[in-house]
Amino acid sequence: MGDLGFHMGVANALMLPYVVYFNFQVMKDRYFRVLRELGLLPVDDVAVLTPEQTKDVLCGFVSGLGLPNRLRDVGITWETLPGLAASAMRVSRLLGNNPRLITESDALAIYQLAF
């Protein structure tokens, strides 16, 4: 997304809630600890923490920093999402470090959620 006219740090912050949502099932305990350390934990028990709660809390955190948290807020259109997903699949370094296997259709779903 760095070639779309906004800083990579903004792109990372914007996508954080949605990538966390995607990875939640394999990273729930770690996300619980991170949210607790940041003072953002919406519940007291990891067993009841949901992907939606985590995404929403992180969206609020990003917004609180004065950063956009939707792709449409930075000028991305719905029609460009498939191209973004295809481009993302060519960044093997990042894909290889993701805790969960990601397909192009997964990437598209993440971008659609972030739209």
Image: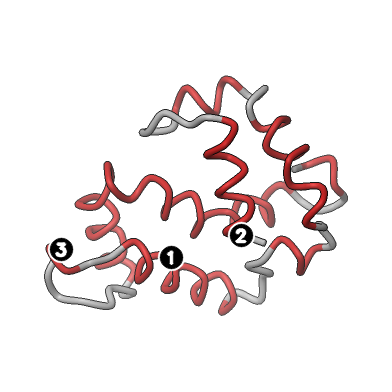
Residue 44 in picture, x, y percent from top left: 14, 75
Q: Which residue is mark 1?
A: 55
Q: Look at 50% across and 77% down and name the residue there.
A: 60
Going by the image, does 28 lie left or right of 15? left
What's the residue type where badge 2 is placed? Ala
Residue 39 in picture, x, y percent from top left: 31, 74
Going by the image, does 48 lie left or right of 7? left
Precedes in sequence: disc 2 or disc 3: 3
On the rendered image, what quadrant is the C terminus found in? bottom right
Secondary structure beneath label 1: helix
**109 vs 100: above or below:** below
Q: Look at 51% across and 56% down and name the residue there.
A: 18
Precedes in sequence: disc 2 or disc 1: 1
What's the residue type where badge 3 is placed? Val
Q: Which residue is mark 3?
A: 46
Which colouring convention does the figure follow? secondary structure
What's the residue type where badge 1 is placed? Lys
Query: Crowding near pointer 2: few (<14 within 10 Å), some, many (20+)?
Result: some
Number of numbered labels in the structure image: 3
Secondary structure beneath label 3: helix
Q: Which residue is mark 2?
A: 114
Residue 55 in picture, x, y percent from top left: 43, 65
Q: Look at 69% across and 57% down and name the residue there.
A: 10
Q: CA distance from mark 3 to mark 1?
A: 15 Å
Going by the image, does 2 lie left or right of 111? right
Q: As rendered, which of 55 and 97 lies closer to the eye?
A: 55
Q: CA distance from mark 2 to mark 3?
A: 24 Å
Q: CA distance from mark 2 to mark 1?
A: 10 Å
